[in-house]
Image (tube, rainbow, N blue to C red):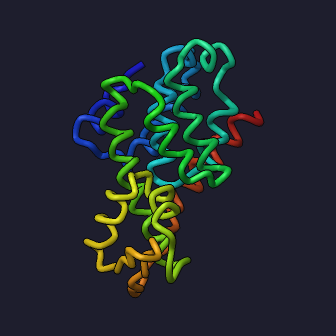
Amino acid sequence: MDLSPVTDALAVKSFDKIADICDSLMLQVAAEGISFQEDWPYAIHLLGHFFVDDCDSARFLWKTIPTSVKESKPEVAAAWRIGQKLWTRDYSGVYEAIRGFDWSQEAKDMVAAFSDVYTKRMFQLLLSAYSTIAIPDLALFLGMTEDDATTYVVEKGWTVDAASQMVTVKKQAIKREQKVDSSKLQRLTEYVFHLEH
């Protein structure tokens, strides 16, 4: 089984492509009838889905992982803990799950990049949902100490009222495009068809 496309993507830090690469390789290997479950990089595959904010696909992947792999590979379970926190919207728990495991060298850069992406997502969430927020709550959402979180948002133009321990959000115009990728839908259809037949 050739996992070089995955290792190549990891080497060049193309973490946003990992999930698609893994999905394609998994379908290809399954179609060829090769036993791959014990050697598959499930932790990387799960993290790839989290990186592109695709918790649904990660959840379905988790359901297909053999119990023996879930129990024998702690990094897979650690990656899934991140998914559980994402699924339940336990924002500070995501950071705890990230920091609560000693990641392999292979996954370390991807986890660090995911943490940065997740912090940016949380910042955008705060930007759209709040006009003011308490500093301790801000720190929980951003997974930082109170001082680091305050510094982070002040650099983004927010203002801090030290007396009340509140931060005033500086609203910005939010531009977000919804991406529809027909090839992903096609792969999902083929995968489901393969599972049913």
Q: Is residue 55 left or right of residue 126?
A: right
**Which residue occupies the foreground of this view, 157 or 160?**
160
Q: Residue visible at 61% across and 51% down?
A: 90
Determine which quarter of the picture holds residue 15: top left
**Name of the residue lying farthest toward the right:** 196
**Name of the residue lying farthest toward the left:** 12
Q: Is residue 75 above or below residue 24?
A: above
**Name of the residue lying farthest toward the front:** 163
User: Residue 20 appears at what percent x and percent y?
Assistant: 46, 45
Q: Is residue 133 left or right of residue 147?
A: right
Q: Is residue 7 left or right of residue 137?
A: left
Q: Residue visible at 39% across and 57% down?
A: 146
**Which residue occupies the foreground of this view, 31 or 139?**
139
Q: Is residue 24 above or below residue 163?
A: above
What quarter of the picture does the N terminus occupy? top left
User: Residue 12 appears at what percent x and percent y?
Assistant: 22, 41
Q: Residue visible at 63% across and 55% down?
A: 89
User: Residue 30 appears at what percent x and percent y?
Assistant: 58, 26
What quarter of the picture does the C terminus occupy? top right
